[in-house]
Amino acid sequence: MGTHSLAGFQRLGVKNLVASVIVLSVLSLGVCAPAYAQRQELEPSSPRELSSLSSGSSRNPGNLRPRQGESSRQSSRESAQDASMLSSNARAALSNFGRGMSSQGMFSWGRVKDSVHFHELMRQLQRGSANTRISSDRLLHFIVSVIYALGLGRVIFPLPTPSPDQKPDTDISPDITSLQVVKKEKEGKYGDRVERWFISSPAMKRIVEVQVLLPKDSSQPAPQLYLLDGVDAPKDNGWLQTGEVIAHIGDDNVIGVLPTHALASFYADWNQPDPVLGYMKWETFLTTELPQVLEAGGHEGINPNGKRAIAGLSMGAGSAVRIAAKHPDVFHAAIGISGCYTTLDPVGRATHELTVHSRGGQVDHMWGPVGSADRNDNDVIERVEGLRNMPVYLSTADGYVTDDVMNEAAKYYWDGLGIGVVLEHGSMHCTKLLDRAMKSQGMDKKKVVYIEGGSHQWINFREQIKPGWEYVRPFLQ
């Protein structure tokens, strides 16, 4: 999935995948039987949206209603037909798997796990499980809450054990004391409007690489849009690659700011260096140093107007909204796509632990152990007041596996589909929490979109950056 790779969660190992396996197993109540599709049709406000809500709306995003104008009998019949089709797909996949294995002679796990037919069978079974009526963010919250209540958190989400030779990808340079742009390079593979800036950062104690999307018309002052990546956050920001951000917002006069090399960092100021992930003071860099550099003047091709929005997907979504809430004097709008915005709720706790541990880091190095002041201080629900005076756009999908989701999942290892569904259920839960928190404070200038059909995939993320940007853009002129 580009830089935000679900396949990367396979690094967790078998034990760490138990969370998704538990959920999908519980949901497999008659996976190949039409009875599972009592799921009602949902009322979309646009072809793929369940609801698009401002804080003043009276609709509850948790109440998914039958489509108006249809009888429940019609809805059930259509759902049963859909279930029958999925059931047939699962049976066909099982048959193909059996024939494929038989034709290869002796069975072996090596042959099984690498078989195309096995992958398709497992994806069909996961699809059936994910599309049961009880498959929801509520069930995920219940299961994760029970895991922590029983003291099984470290069993299900164990701390990684780094090998002795593991070390961070980026070396620190304690002698860096001056904030400056060391050099710039044109990145021709994205056209003539993307540059890579190498910034000497005293906060990060290293040279930080930031990709900059130049505005369409540099003679006119333009707002900045900081775009934070998902968990892998490698050398090339995912928004430029799979996110296709140039195609979505490139015609607008906006300066895109895309940090790189932020693996599993949550773009936070970590309390202590991590043996695997390294030394990180991302929040200070993004809120103090980078604005100074970009707006110092003298940079050909950009003309900032002093207005900044911050956006992200998945890990980057939670980070973007958290940073905006903590620094409303720096950022004037926030966009969160399929993110989690709480560190205190069980789902939020699991999200942070899984994300950091999946890449070999230890989450306690970020904000300390559960119950610490720093963990509490970085819960957006608790400090929602910081978002009051800015536009906020949030979106999340319901985890229902559509044909598009299946086609995207087919590009990766079989368990990516189930993991993506679980992650998106977590995003739905976290988004509802923040939505309710903003409503309870009577905040306006907030839009929350709940999407019918979709998982934790780039086909979901990239579709939401343009409407998110269009919503906040008028406030940045």
Image: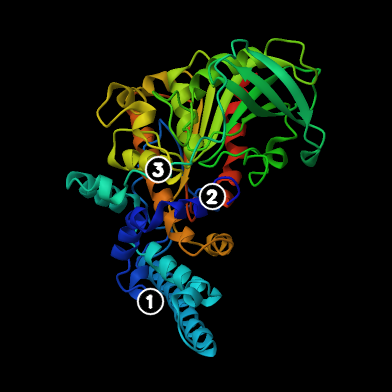
Q: Which residue is mark 3?
A: 357
Give the answer, above or below, for where 78 lies relative to 435.
below
Residue 267 at what x, y percent from top left?
49, 29
Q: Secondary structure at mark 2?
A: loop
Q: Amino acid at mark 2?
A: Ser
Decide: few, some or many residues near mark 1? Use Cα within 10 Å; few <14, some 14-19, many ≥20.
many
Q: Which residue is mark 2?
A: 5
Give the answer, above or below, for where 39 lies relative to 455.
below
Residue 56 at what x, y percent from top left?
40, 30
Is 240 in front, or is 128?
240
Decide: few, some or many residues near mark 3? Use Cα within 10 Å; few <14, some 14-19, many ≥20.
many
> Does residue 59 show up?
no
Q: Secondary structure at mark 3?
A: helix
Give the answer, above or below, for where 406 lies relative to 424.
below
Q: Which residue is mark 1?
A: 32
Decide: few, some or many residues near mark 2? Use Cα within 10 Å; few <14, some 14-19, many ≥20.
many
Answer with mark 1 or mark 2, whichever residue precedes in sequence: 2
- 3 or 2: mark nearer the eye: 3
> Does residue 355 show up?
yes
Outermost residue to the front: 164
Q: Amino acid at mark 3?
A: His
Count of numbered labels shown in the rendering: 3
Give the answer, above or below, for where 102 lies relative to 127.
below
